[in-house]
Amino acid sequence: MRTHQYHQFVHWIRTTASSLLATYPALRTPLFGLRDSAARLAVATRRLRTRLEYAAPTNPYRLYWVDPKSVSESISWQELTDDWAAAIPDPFRLPNYHFAGSVLDGEWDSERRPFSDSVIFRSFQAHFEDDQPWAETDLYRQCLAVIESGGSPWGCTSPAALDERCREIDRLYTTVDREGYRTQREIADCANQPLVAARQNRYAQTVDGEIALVVGHDGELLFYDGRNRLAIAKLVGIEAVPVVILARHSQWQTLRDRVASGETPLSSLDDALQSHPDLVDLPPA
């Protein structure tokens, strides 16, 4: 099946599921269970394949603790539009499990933009540091425009839902500022956490829950998903946050394999690479 046809097929499945949920809310639990089962199977299959192909296999479930300031570039969307997916490279326009654990060729990592230029970060900074009301931020205005055109940006389908979303972000910011940054697994064990859906399995808590990065050909940690959490972590001044690495460029994977096999000693690399989170303590094949 060609890529475009596959994307259309996945879109049809998601649209059909959404329609079923709107008509039969009781189907939510079984449908989400089926989705998570399919996701875990896809990730498990890809993990097995990389264990057979690479000296340094991939593991999208592994948590890495990184300084939020070290994640400065993004390959994901910057502004909210009716077709926000157009601002994401082709391999990443599907749900995370379709590519989690992948090693990818090509130039998908070439179009990078500063995360600080994103509408989320700009608006969060204006609101939390400059006391700008949510309704005056670029994020709020863009959300309203997309809602008026029939979309559901930021998970909102009405101005009232958007206002509630903003209040939840306020509560999340306060929680992180006062109590620190928790992993999704830790949050799942706590009651009354803002912006927390039920994340009861390993896939939902990591691959589909934590800040998600990809690694470019040069080893740069590039932002992909979890913009709310990363923006808040940066603004609060958190020193280290848990992240998952969903995909890697094939050139970078070649270096990982050489380090894992001993062909290229870690000590022979530049200082920055010697402490790179995706090279240090490589798991055994």
Image: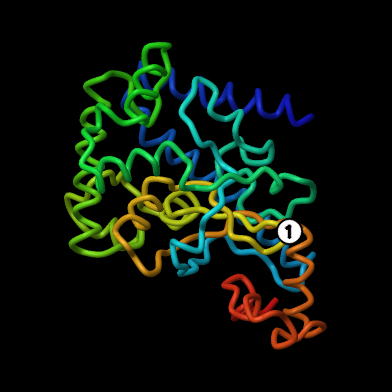
Residue beneath the point at 78% across and 85% down: 262
| Amino acid type of the residue that numbered disc 1 sits on in the rendered structure | His
Q: Nearer the viewer, residue 139 or 180?
A: 139
Query: Can you tell which quarter of the image residue 175 is in?
Result: bottom left
Name the residue at the front extreme. Answer: 130
Name the residue at the top extreme. Answer: 149
The spot of residue 5 in percent (x, y) is: 73, 24
Left/right placement of residue 265 relative to residue 122 reads right
Q: Secondary structure at mark 1?
A: loop
**Residue 113, placed above or below residue 4:** below
> Could one spot residue 97 in this view of the protein?
no
Residue beneath the point at 79% across and 29% down: 2
Q: Residues within 10 Å of mark 1 (few under 14, many from 20)?
A: many
The quadrant in which the N terminus is found is top right
The spot of residue 51 in percent (x, y) is: 72, 67
> Could one spot residue 187 in this view of the protein?
yes
**Residue 80, placed above or below residue 62:** above
Query: Can you tell which quarter of the image residue 237 is in?
Result: bottom left
Residue beneath the point at 71% across and 62% down: 218
Q: Nearer the viewer, residue 271 or 208?
A: 271
In the picture of the structure, the residue carrying the numbered disc 1 is 217
The spot of residue 31 in percent (x, y) is: 44, 33
**Residue 75, placed above or below residue 245:** above
**Residue 71, placed above or below residue 12:** below
Number of marks:
1
The quadrant in which the C terminus is found is bottom right
Left/right placement of residue 71 relative to residue 269 reads left
Left/right placement of residue 7 relative to residue 32 reads right
Query: Can you tell which quarter of the image residue 137 is in?
Result: top left
Residue beneath the point at 24% across and 49% down: 172
